[in-house]
Amino acid sequence: MRKKSTNNKEKAEQLAQAFKEKTIITTGDIVEYCQSTEPNVLKSTINWRVYEWVQNGVLTRVSRGHFKLGEVLNYVPDLSKKALQVWSHLISGLPFVRYCVWDAASIIEFADRIQKINMIFVDVERGSEESTYHLLKQRFQNVWLKPKKSLLESHIVETNKPIVVRVLVSEAPILLAEGIPTAPLEKILVDVVSDPEFYFLNGYEIEHIFGKALTTYTVDENKMKRYASRKRKQEKLAEVLRRIPSISDL
């Protein structure tokens, strides 16, 4: 029994070494690897090993047939003091509306050349955006309702911590951070490639953000793709993923 346990540990270490440079590992990758080291290995044996590796934290399943090395590392964004004030004001004035409050500065952690982003987003269920806008205007300055790209470029990004009220796409992924509904990484990444508020990000910067986010945290691929589909941006998301080395099989 001890010999078998040691053998399994060695195989796990060898697997980790073989795929240390790969962000996403597919079932096909694992089968090919196992068969290259053990030509006569049974598919059922490989399936059992994959199960054990997932259970032991050697692999993390990110979607059907796709894995990452290591245990789950979930992303939890930091909310700025002003974002917390915004949320507090919202729930006191419109407590039954569905919101997602998040700070665009969240992406700085993954960016290469971007060092400052001002905007706070209040994504709110369709039909409640105007009442949310007027409620926020009662307390805060620089509140904007669904601004166009031209206004973002010419004025908004230069103001001090503008609050941008937008429509929350139905079935958008939401993360509860200390009871506050905010944006998980799956939502942030899709918004980065699809929303006009991120007009200032070029192709290189977007690829850098995706690459670092996907290698640092566990990202639910299916959740990200479902959200992109709801926004009709699935092709744009797929195009970005194809340009990132080692995750072109997503």
Image (cartoon, rainbow, N blue to C red):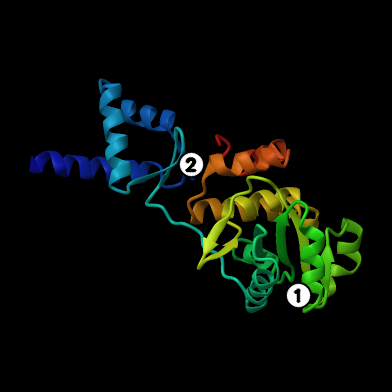
Contact between marks 2 and 1 (CB within 8 A): the answer is no
Q: Which residue is found at the position 78% from the left and 78% from the top? A: 140
Is 162 in front, or is 213? 162
Residue receiving disc 2: 24
Could you tell which of marks 2 and 1 lies nearer the N-terminus?
Answer: 2
Image quarter (top left, top right, bottom left or bottom right) of the C terminus: top right
The residue that disc 1 covers is 161
Residue type at tag 1: Lys
Identify whether 182 is placed above or below 214.
below
Judge by depth and name the residue closer to the eye, 221 or 35. Answer: 221
Q: Decide: few, some or many residues near mark 2? Use Cα within 10 Å; few <14, some 14-19, many ≥20.
A: many
Q: State the image coordinates of residue 167 (x, y, percent, origin top left).
A: 75, 53
Q: Residues within 10 Å of mark 1 (few under 14, many from 20)?
A: some
Above or below: residue 80 compared with residue 152: below
Using the rendered view, name the quadrant where residue 119 is placed: bottom right
Q: Nearer the viewer, residue 101 or 186?
A: 101
- Kind of residue indicated by mark 2: Ile
Note whether residue 231 is visible: yes
In the image, what residue occupies the spot 29% across and 29% down? 46
Q: Would residue 134 appear left or right of 121 to someone viewing this image?
A: right
The residue mark sitting in front, 2 or 1, is 1
User: In the orientation shown, which residue stands out farthest toward the left?
Assistant: 1
Q: Which quadrant is home to the N terminus?
A: top left
Residue in the foreground of this view, choosing between 74 and 168: 168
Q: List x then y, in percent, for residue 208.
A: 63, 54
SS for dot 1: loop
